[in-house]
Image (cartoon, helix red, strand yellow):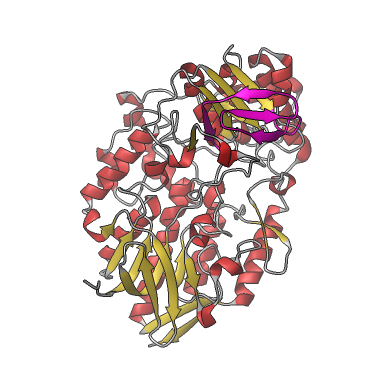
Amino acid sequence: MVNQTQELDVLVVGAGFAGLYMLHKLRSERFSVHAVEAGAGVGGTWFWNRYPGARCDVPSVEYSYSFSPELEQEWRWSERYAAQPEILSYLEHVTERFDLARDISFNTRVASAHWNEGDRRWLVATDAGDTYAARYVILATGALSEPKAPDLPGLGEFKGSVLHTAKWDENVDLAGKRVAVFGTGSSGIQVVPPLARTAGQLVVFQRTPNFAVPANNHAMTDELRETMQRELPDNRAAARQSALGFFAQPRSGSAKAESDEAREARFEEQWRAGTTGLLLAYEDLLIDEESNSYAAEFARRKIAATVEDPEVARKVTPQGYPLGSRRMCSEIGFYEALNRDNVRLVDVREEPVTAITADTIETAADRYSIDAIVFATGFDAMVGAIKAIDVRGGDGRSLREEWSVGPRSYLGLAVAGFPNLFTVNGPGSPSVLSNVVLSIEQHVDWIVRCLADLRAHGSDRIEATEEAESAWMDHANEVAHSTLFPRANSWYQGRTRDGRDVFMPYVGGCGAYRHTCDEIAADDYRGFRIAHS
């Protein structure tokens, strides 16, 4: 039987936080819409990332939807920082509450999306054999969703279990095994403590140490919930206009202008305030190198006070980049895990991996017998899931090829040469350097408003201009270089079409970015080329 092509106003790719809200919002505006999801259920990154210790490093109440006051009132988070199962349960509840599953195809990946200029539609094919003809395609694929693993010599020879934190296999039992973990970013810092408690031996292979602060996680009491619910409307409104989209704001003053005693006292207080606490101790920590150096040195002293072996402490202590210029991590027992007799830390810059055999990992200095390898090595950030699709725009231009040297985008929303295609939290938007759920809601609201405006004015084609795209990427890069973010070699960095390095996320602030997007929409979508039916 040949599947018939389904005609749609909008096809949404992905059913995580972005895809679910997009589906709900488009349905409320009476667009015909369908979503395609690679997983067997909703959740996006929270469907796939089921590794031990997985949890959000943004407070649960903030890492949740604000579009429905009723939803906000009825859902009761159990912890300050929710673990993966609870976040997934929340998204499943949202799906059921708003009856979203009936418009989602699960276990289905989009293989290709080709623009047909004559029909002004996207022709979309999936690996399940389904085809769609959609006026608009919205890529809600997630900025951190396409996992990547290092290219290690001899990895194909290894006979044990190989897992990635972003594609965890819960059927693999690592209890009592000799386990290697590669990576000490956010996922690695979370997975190491539970593995250290259950594995027979754990070898942690680290390339670049990251700053990690105590999560200070705790249960949510009824009294705390009542207080947070009462303050929620004001906190949400303030967060939308803030720099990072969080409830907590930077404290006033300059670290370098404080006395040693006052500065130490404030750092100590903020150290216990969660993921962004230390960064918010003073308002100049991300723009002034001297002020930042005081905070970084405070964090280094905390690591040295926790890690008992001075040599291990040296290896795991970040050096050479400002605090916060790489993603800040929160930890629950990571540094303490390095003190265990069954845990060893290997710095691959000093002791590079030279070979992997059927049951060993060999380095320049030693040989480790291993039963299982866990890659906590992150993602092809911001672009990987999009590049996995064969997207072809005007004149058959390949988005994968256009982004082969790095992504480019106008506002993180649209790409020149690809009409009627939108990205949620794309490069050039606050995305990964903000409260991502807040940024998702802002993008969804803007895109749906745009589509409704186009429909109201009899228009059926919109495309970012190359001039606007280039100017925006230059602006985003200029703003970034007024901060300390570009001082680190991180996955925040990208490249332009002509080979220049650029900073991918927009760091000018969530509030400023929201104002710019609204201003562009009010100015007849300045920077976009619009055509009528």
Residue, x 60% and y 26% (percent of image)?
A: 204
Q: Nearer the viewer, residue 190 or 297?
A: 190
Residue, x 47% and y 82% (percent of image)?
A: 530
Residue, x 56% and y 74% (percent of image)?
A: 416
Residue 159 visible? The answer is: yes
Left or right placement of residue 470 versus residue 382 in this view: right
Percent x, y of residue 221: 33, 23
Q: Is residue 96 above or below residue 202?
A: below
Residue 274 visible? The answer is: no
Q: Is residue 90 above or below residue 361?
A: below
Q: Is residue 190 above or below residue 389?
A: above
Residue numbers of the magenta segment = 347-376
Left or right placement of residue 356 versus residue 101 in this view: right
Name the image quarter holding the N terminus: bottom left
The image quadrant that residue 321 belongs to is: top right
Name the image quarter holding the C terminus: bottom left
Percent x, y of residue 192: 53, 25
